[in-house]
Structures are given as C-alpha cells and as structure tokens.
Image (cartoon, rainbow, N blue to C red):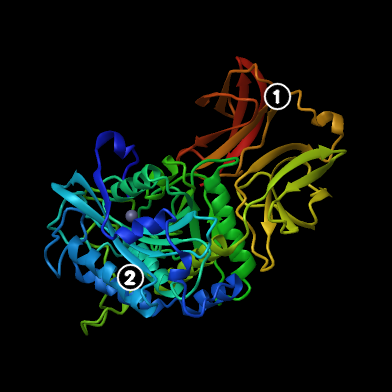
Amino acid sequence: MFFSFSASLLFSQTNLHLSNPVAKNILKGNFDPSAYQPAFPVSNPNFIIQNINANVSADSLKSYLERLDDFETRNTGSDTLSASRGIGAARAYIHQKFAQFSNFQNGRLITSYFSFDQDICGMMRHKNVLGILPGSDTINKDIIIIEGHFDSRCETSCDTACAAHGMEDNGSGTALVIELARVMSFYSFKQTLVFMATTGEEQGLLGARAFADFLTQENISVEAVLNNDVIGGVICGQTSSAPSCPGKDLIDSTQVRLFSGGGYNSTNKCLTRFIKLQYLDELISTVNVPMLVTLMTSEDRTGRGGDHIPFRQNNIPAIRFTSAHEHGNAGVGPNYHDRQHTSDDILGVDTDNDNVLDSFYVDFNYLARNAVINGAAITALALGPEQPDYTITPVNGDLEIVVNDPYSYGTYKVGFRTTGWDFDTLMTFTGSSAILNPGLTGNAFVSLMAVDNNNIESLANKEQAIFKISIDENELSGNEFILLQNKPNPFDESTAIGFYVPTEKSKQAVIKITSLDGRVIKELETEVSKGMNEVIYEHGYGIEGNFVYSLYVDGALIESKKMTFIY
Ligand SMILES: [Zn+2]
C-alpha cells in the first residue's frame, strides 16, 4: 500500500502494451466465444460455487507462497534478469502457473504480460501478469477482474537490496488470485474473467493505474474489480492502520473486511453488498467455518490505499478485500516492530530447529476461505442475471415498484437499508410490479435485483432514497429538507451523513460536527443538488463518545442529530 494520491498527475506511463495480441482482442470482446469453450462446459453457478468451495486448497495456497518466498524480494525495481531472485523471477513464476493451468484446459486460459514504461525505482519497464478466461456470452462483453499486487517492499520503497518477502503484503493476495485461476478455469462463464497480479503498487498503485488507463483508452467495459491485498494474516500487530484491530497478538480468523469508496448509490458499495449477499445465499450454510463479511465505510484504511482506487477513479466499480487483523501500519522508526513493510513479513518461523517452518504468519485456511468468498461472487457476477431497470413510488405508506426488464426474469428481490451498509430487509416478489411494505419506519435506501432460475441475484447498481416510509402520503411530497441519521452509527473511523434537498434553488450546505458542549470539531462544506446528498465524515481515531452533527443550507440551520463514535 501507499499513501493515496493521483499517481497519473505525478508520473507518466507510456507504452501500455499486452504481450499477447490475442489477449487484447479478448478483453475488447473481439473473439469467437465457441473457440474457447471447454469440451464439456459446466456453467451452473450453484454447482460451480460449491466446487470452488470444495477445490480451493490451503495446501495449494501454501505452495504458491513458499515459491514466492524463494525470490527473496519482489520490489518493483529489483532484478529482472535473475531466475532465482527479484521481481522478474516472481512474475515469470506467476505467468508459468497461469500457463500450466491453461495447459490443463486446452489453452483456454489466455496468458499475457501487460507492460508499461515509467521510471519507478530507476527502472523503466514494468509488467503485470494476466490470465484471461474468455466468456461465452456474445452480447454482454463486460469483463470481471480479480487481482492482487505481487510486488513487495521494506521500510524504504525503492530498497531493492533488503529481503522483502512480502508474505502477508501481498503474497497472500497473489496466491489467492493464482488459486482462483486454477480452480475457476475448469468452468464456463458468460463473462470474461481476468486474473491479474500487478506490480508497482508499493510506489503508488502504478501497475493498477496503468491497466485502468489502458482499459479506459481501449473502451473495454468492466463490471467489477475485486482487489485482494493483505488477506491472509490473522494476528493483530502492536500497530495497525485505523480502523485497527483490538490489540497485540489477538487473532481473528473468521472475519474479512470489504473496503470501498462512496456512500449512497455508490457502485462500489453496491458491489460489496452483492459479494456479501452471494456468500450468505450460496455458501454460509455449507461451509465448515462461517465468515463474517464486514462492509467498511472508508475506501481504505486511514492514510493507506490500494489497487482498487485507480479503477474507481476511472469509474469502474472496484473494492478491496483485507484481513480483519493486520500486523503493522507500514510505519518506520525505532519503535516499529511489526512485520508489514519490513524484512520480517515472512511466511512463518521454525520453532523446533528442524529447518522446517512450523508456525505460520499466513493462515492458509483463512486465506482459502477468503478465496472462496471471492470465487462465489465472481461466479454469481459472471453467470447471474442482468440488472433490471425500475421505478419506485411511495403510495399510501407502501412502496410501488414497477420493473422494466427486457429479460423478464419474473422474480425480483428488493433490498432495504437504513442506517448501515448492509441490507436490513430483503423482500421477494414475482411478476413485473408489486406493492410492498418493508415494515420500516423513517428513511430507507432501496434497490432492486433480478433473480434468475438458479436463484442468483443481479448486481444492484442503482439505489433510490425513500423518505418517511409508512406515514401519510402527503408527507412524502418532499417539500422539506431532511437530515438523515448517519450510517453506520455507532461508527468507528468514518461515517456517512445523508440529507435530502427538495429544490434546485439551494446551492451550498455545511455539515457541522460539534462536541456535546458545542465545540466545533469539523465543518464539511459541500455543493448540493436536488434529491439525496451525502458526505463522508472521517473522525479518525480521536476522542470517543457522542457528537452532534448539524445541517446548514445556504446559511440556515435545518436540523441537528446525535452520533456516537466508538473505538
Ligand atoms: Zn499491499
């Protein structure tokens, strides 16, 4: 990870290039899908998801990590000529794994390097590694990307001499991508899947930046990017970036965090809800160790960033998977003893002096569980229904939903959420319209998903804000400003504050955060538009307790509400 800034403003990336010309045609949708189908295509999503769960292997993940460990460093500026040490050997290994999986599948998994020219750590040419599984659909050409950065670092980002094993950060995410390429390349998906290991992340998300810009320049349409970064460790360090884990050496092997940018109607947040919903629908009742999937408010940990950000900046829905517990905050200095971004980010230790590691810092079973969550979501995205259009209108305290769906799936799920990022309630109906009452009072965000014959939901990329459900219709006419309860609440780190603006006339709003005794902590100024508006408040890790937030529009106080910050 790196401090976030817009890398493209500071550096220039040129010569964006795929080494395999077939790869470019497939990404652009210029290919004959029948040429890339397996001999006996398996495309039932429920079956595939269960098989991913059965076949993702902790031992395979361990073997990839052991091999990545051998290269000693994968610094972006390290050796590209050696066969045994440095980033060149590491990327050749990842490429070779993709090629090996492709050989099992009659060459269906198309391998390619993606290179770009940029001065990073004194080196000019850099390469991401791709395995591309062509889709079967002749109409929907949107691709789906599953990725993790494979470069690593020590305290200084261009130190190519130190040992930078980078096992948690981010051998774990790299191994996850390799394993999903192995397991998923057996099956046939409607949409093209791209398994990618990126470079240059530690110097400013540069491999992801280059690829995101390539996709934009080439008009390649992307449905979703799932970035996996720091995804295999379960031990909390002495330090960890906020929102932090609870304390040194505490373990959490049953929770994963999904970071994403935006709030109300964010396509990134919609993607996190979709991922969680697929896990709850398709997997949680059959897995041995159920996982808690936590949807985070912020795009990343405080002051940190990841490869999902350049894609999001190019208007591609993109999210980040990160373990619940991190060993370090990438700090430097004499009092920093954690493993992240040091030579200590190793696979594990040999406690009985037999020269074999027996105590591991990456939990391979935890990593496997996270791979399965990714795999289920990708399967559902790549084989699920298309998103329908719809209108929703409050009628006498109920909600009337009318679906405009050229695919006529006939079954729909409506998600309601109030003060958090999760759905509070899901309601199902059949037909093309329905009158629903979710039994909620107050304000809600509503979105509609189509459900196909396999009981897979579509992605819901359009939320609508509905105010004052279950009260008199006359009060729904929207002639007043409404300040919503912040979400989540109580919150740690950051929270979203929404408000409704009834007219085009209002131009400027201020959200003022104050302590209970009236001391102003923060003023968030924002331009407003008619309808729902939202600002994200980053509290950081300051004082705990209750605070007041107030909405001022064009200088006039509208309303105040209370919110609670807990550590
Ligand atoms: Zn990382």
Residue 304 visible? The answer is no
Element carrying mark 2: helix
Q: Does the residue labelled 1 lie within 8 Å of ligand 1?
A: no
In this rendering, the answer to whether 374 lies above or below 1 is below
Q: Mark 2 points at which residue?
A: 98
- Please name the residue shown 11% across and 66% down the image: 82
Observer-nearest of 162 and 191: 191
Residue 111: x and y in percent read 32, 65
In this rendering, the answer to whether 71 lies above or below 76 is below
Observer-nearest of 16 and 281: 16
Residue 213 visible? The answer is yes
| Three-letter amino acid code at the position of disc 1 | Pro
Q: Name the residue under label 1.
A: 502
- Foreground: disc 2 or disc 1: 2
Residue 77: x and y in percent read 17, 53
- Tell me the distance, in whole angstroms, between the alpha carbons under discs 2 and 1: 54 Å
Observer-nearest of 298 and 565: 298
Observer-nearest of 285 and 303: 285
- Please name the residue shown 37% across and 50% down the image: 307
Q: Does the residue labelled 2 lie within 8 Å of ligand 1?
A: no
